Amino acid sequence: MKKVVAFVPIKTNNERLPGKNTKKFSNGKPLISYILDTLVRVEMLDEIYVYCSDPSIKEYLPAGVIFLERDKYLDLSTTSFNEVLTTFANKVHADIYVLTHATAPFISVKTFEKAITALKSGEYDSALSVERLQEFFWKDGVPLNYDPVKIPRTQDLIPYYIETCGMYAYTSKLIKDEGRRVGHHPFLVEVSKKEACDINNPEDFVIADALTMFSDNI
């Protein structure tokens, strides 16, 4: 049996939106509670961690989530995020790691299960959440994916996929041997527009607050 560990790295010294991880939505629920409440419902996970330098975060953790204190140097803006990932992997053993963020509150149980299933198959070394885009793209004043003389329907355009940064899964070998979260054979997990929501600034939080009032079918 492969051991699967999920973890949520948390910084409490956020610069663009101070205190965002524990900031409450209009419904009174803290941002961090959304992703943690989802993770505890993922039956394919063996352990769930919050990886944070501030022990006060423990008051927000539901039953079944483990607090693991990390060194404060990992909170520095000069610290590479890959160092955070490799440090966690060296502290907690697993065959498969699932990385997610409080700032991606709407990632679903099904998305996590798809990623874990893909890695357990042995066919892939990583998985990541992506949003499908079928739009008219331009670069340097030139259309990338269509002919302006013969304008196609958007649904006929070749789709592009953008990382949502909401969920990554990767093997122990990949992170420990190469220090990577996306490997040579990644599995793309397409997510809804709501799941693709990622909170970095005050405007993002306002949008996410509005999304809490809607169903997952958007």
Image (cartoon, grey):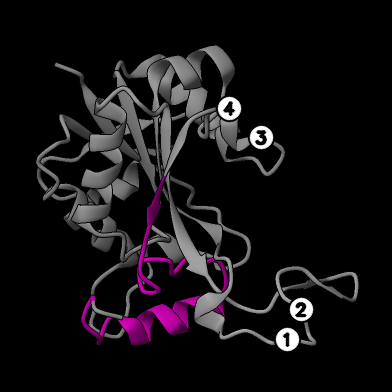
Gap in Å between the C-alphas at discs 1 and 3? 48 Å
Circles 2 and 1: CB distance less than 8 Å? yes
Foreground residue, 42 or 81? 42
Q: In the rendered image, which residue does mark 2 sit on?
A: 147
Label 4 or label 2, whichever comes before in sequence order: 4
Which marked residue is nearer to the observer: mark 4 or mark 2? 2
Label 4 or label 1, whichever comes before in sequence order: 4
**Whether residue 19 is visible:** no
Q: Residues within 10 Å of mark 3 (few under 14, many from 20)?
A: few
Up the image or down, 134 lies above or below 126; here it is: below
Gap in Å between the C-alphas at discs 4 and 1? 48 Å
Which marked residue is nearer to the observer: mark 4 or mark 1? 1
Q: Is residue 210 found inside the magenta-colored segment of the image?
A: yes
The percent coordinates of residue 141 (x first, y second) are: 90, 76
Quadrant containing the C terminus in the rendered view: bottom left
157 relative position to 216: left or right: right
